[in-house]
C-alpha cells in the first residue's frame, strides 16, 4: 500500500469515486509531466453542499466543504494516475473559491479544510 493510502486509512477516510463532470469539461488534463485537475464542488452524502459563509454557514462547515472538495480532487488525481500514487510527485498549487458575504474575512480558514487534508 502507498503512503497516501496508508494516511487516508489512518484518518478513516475512503476516497469517493472520481465525480463525473457536472458540465461540458474534462475532469483533468495531463500536459507533459503536469496534471491539471478541474475544479471540484462540495458534496456530501445528501448531495451538493449549499450556503454562504458569513450568512448561513459557519467557518467549520465551510472547512468541511473544502475538505470534501479535496477528497474529490484526490479521487480525480488517483483516476488520472490509473490508481498508481507513485506517479504523483507533489502538488504544485491549490486554488479555492469561497462563497461568502462581503464582510466575511476568514476565507483562508475555510480553505484550510482542503489544505490540512492534503498536507496531513
Image (cartoon, rainbow, N blue to C red):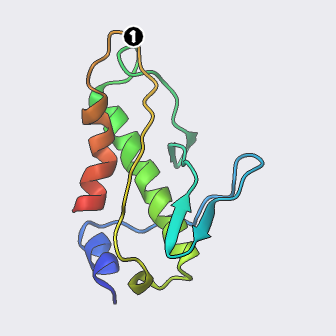
Q: Is residue 43 left or right of residue 71?
A: right
For this rendering, which residue is in front, 11 or 31? Answer: 31
Across and down, in percent, residue 7 comes to 26, 73
Across and down, in percent, residue 83 comes to 51, 82
Q: Is residue 50 above or below residue 86?
A: above
Across and down, in percent, residue 2 comes to 33, 86
At label 1, counting other C-alpha atoms closer than 10 Å, the crowd grade (few under 14, some 14-19, many 20 or more) is: few
Secondary-structure class at tag 1: loop
* Residue in the picture at 35% in, 76% down: 89
* Residue in the picture at 27% in, 34% down: 108
Q: Is residue 21 left or right of residue 17?
A: right
Quadrant housing residue 63: top left
Quadrant containing the C terminus is: bottom left
* Residue in the picture at 78% in, 48% down: 24
Q: Is residue 118 above or below residue 68?
A: below
* Residue in the picture at 46% in, 49% down: 69
Across and down, in percent, residue 46 comes to 55, 43
For this rendering, which residue is in front, 32 or 43? Answer: 32
Q: Farthest residue toward the bottom?
A: 1
Quadrant containing the N terminus is: bottom left
Residue at image mark 1: 102
Q: Farthest residue toward the top?
A: 103
Q: Farthest residue toward the right?
A: 24
Q: Is residue 81 left or right of residue 102?
A: right
Quadrant housing residue 86: bottom left
Q: Is residue 62 above or below residue 78?
A: above
Amino acid at each position: 500500500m502507498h503512503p497516501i493510502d496508508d494516511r487516508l486509512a489512518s484518518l478513516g477516510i475512503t476516497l469517493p469515486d472520481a465525480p463525473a463532470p457536472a458540465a461540458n469539461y474534462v475532469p483533468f488534463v495531463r500536459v507533459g509531466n503536469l496534471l491539471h485537475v478541474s475544479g471540484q464542488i462540495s458534496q456530501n452524502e445528501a448531495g451538493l453542499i449549499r450556503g454562504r459563509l458569513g450568512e448561513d454557514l459557519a467557518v467549520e462547515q465551510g472547512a468541511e466543504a473544502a475538505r470534501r472538495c479535496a477528497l474529490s480532487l484526490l479521487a480525480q488525481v488517483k483516476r488520472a494516475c490509473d490508481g498508481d500514487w507513485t506517479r504523483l510527485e507533489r502538488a504544485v498549487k491549490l486554488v479555492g473559491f469561497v462563497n461568502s458575504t462581503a464582510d466575511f474575512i476568514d476565507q483562508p480558514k475555510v480553505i484550510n479544510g482542503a489544505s490540512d487534508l492534503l498536507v496531513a
